[in-house]
Image (tube, rainbow, N blue to C red):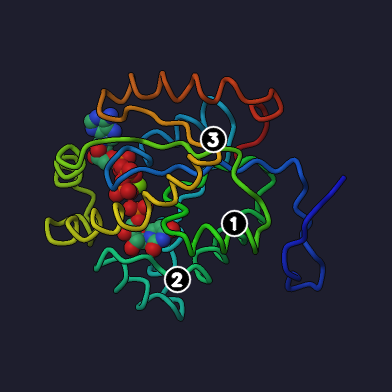
């Protein structure tokens, strides 16, 4: 079986990533419902949920060497350089027993996409795209009330601009490869999940069982 290798581990060994690893990128504007739907996918289909934004937030909270820089990027709604985000995703994938991942909020731009495919050496099975109008996104974020530093009207404007200018082209890229599953995300949480279920139900059976760690 063909495999690709992650970089050397602390103990000198190499984590081998097998062809059977399945990656799904979950994309959509800020507030489109990625973080709401992903736990439901975990519950029903046994994927491991990796949220790029949460991995970056953990770096901020652990006061790592890049924490302050990441916090500043987040406050400005800017995309953190790929070398940081891809490394965090790669580590989380290596540490997981589960080899089926939904990666929430990634790839944010072309640089992210190329870095992931070149370094991790996996192409996503498909991209789950939550399509939602701008006014609804803004309304949802302003009502979210989770204390996020970027959930304010000024940063929302910046995040939406970055989404339209940098993330939509990634979605368009995968669409040109026939890899986008578009969901109308403006409906209720339950209605949206009905469509999400239909998409995942079509995956080969091996992708529907197993650990969520
Ligand atoms: N279908 C829906 N209808 C109404 N509200 C929703 C729906 N889906 C999610 N929400 C609400 O909208 C807000 C944003 O949802 P969520 O955090 O899942 O978005 P997100 O795509 O992860 O956003 P971000 O990119 O900013 O992390 C939350 O308060 C959530 O409860
Ligand atoms: O791949 C990523 C994911 C996130 N960011 C930064 O984090 C914030 C919040 O991300 P959410 O997915 O909305 O939780 C985002 O605006 C970026 O600043 C990133 O740089 N790269
Ligand atoms: Mg989210």
The kind of secondary structure element at disc 3 is: loop
Q: Nearer the viewer, mark 1 or mark 3?
A: 3
Mark pair 2, 1: CA separation: 17 Å
- Which image quarter holds the C terminus? top right
Q: Observer-nearest residue: 121 or 201?
A: 121
Where is 87 relative to 51, above or below?
below
Q: Observer-nearest residue: 166 or 108?
A: 166
- Left or right: residue 37 versus residue 178 is left
Question: Which residue is painted at 35% across and 43% down in the image?
Answer: 28
- Left or right: residue 155 versus residue 34 is left
The part of the image, by quadrant, that contains residue 29 is: top left
Question: Which residue is painted at 75% across and 40% down in the image?
Answer: 20
**Residue reaching furthest to the right:** 1
Mark 1 residue crowding within 10 angstroms, few (<14) / some (14–19) / many (20+) = few
- Left or right: residue 109 versus residue 46 is left
What label sits on residue 92 in the rendered view? 1
Residue 182 seen: yes
The kind of secondary structure element at disc 2 is: loop
Residue 57 seen: no
Q: Position of residue 41 (x, y in %)?
A: 49, 30
- Which image quarter holds the N terminus? top right
Mark 2 residue crowding within 10 angstroms, few (<14) / some (14–19) / many (20+) = some
Q: Earlier in the sequence, mark 2 or mark 3?
A: 2
Which residue is the site of mark 2? 81
């Amino acid at each position: 079986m063909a495999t690709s290798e992650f970089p050397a581990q602390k103990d000198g060994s190499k984590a081998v990533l097998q062809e059977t690893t399945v990656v799904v990128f979950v994309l959509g504007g800020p507030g489109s419902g990625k973080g709401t739907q992903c736990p439901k996918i975990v519950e029903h289909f046994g994927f491991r949920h990796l949220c790029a934004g949460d991995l970056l937030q953990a770096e901020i909270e652990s006061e790592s060497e890049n924490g302050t820089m990441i916090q500043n990027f987040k406050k400005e709604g800017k995309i953190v350089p790929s070398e940081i985000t891809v490394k965090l995703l790669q580590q989380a994938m290596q540490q997981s027993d589960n080899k089926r991942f939904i990666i929430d909020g990634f790839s944010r731009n072309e640089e992210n996409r190329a870095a992931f495919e070149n370094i991790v050496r996996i192409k996503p099975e498909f991209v789950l795209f939550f399509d939602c109008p701008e006014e609804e996104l803004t309304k949802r974020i302003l009502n979210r009330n989770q204390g996020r530093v970027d959930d304010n009207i000024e940063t929302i404007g910046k995040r939406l601009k970055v989404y339209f200018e940098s993330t939509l082209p990634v979605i368009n890229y995968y669409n040109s490869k026939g890899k986008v599953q578009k969901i109308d995300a403006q409906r209720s949480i339950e209605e949206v999940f009905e469509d999400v279920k239909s998409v995942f139900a079509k995956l080969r059976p091996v992708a529907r069982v197993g650990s969520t760690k």
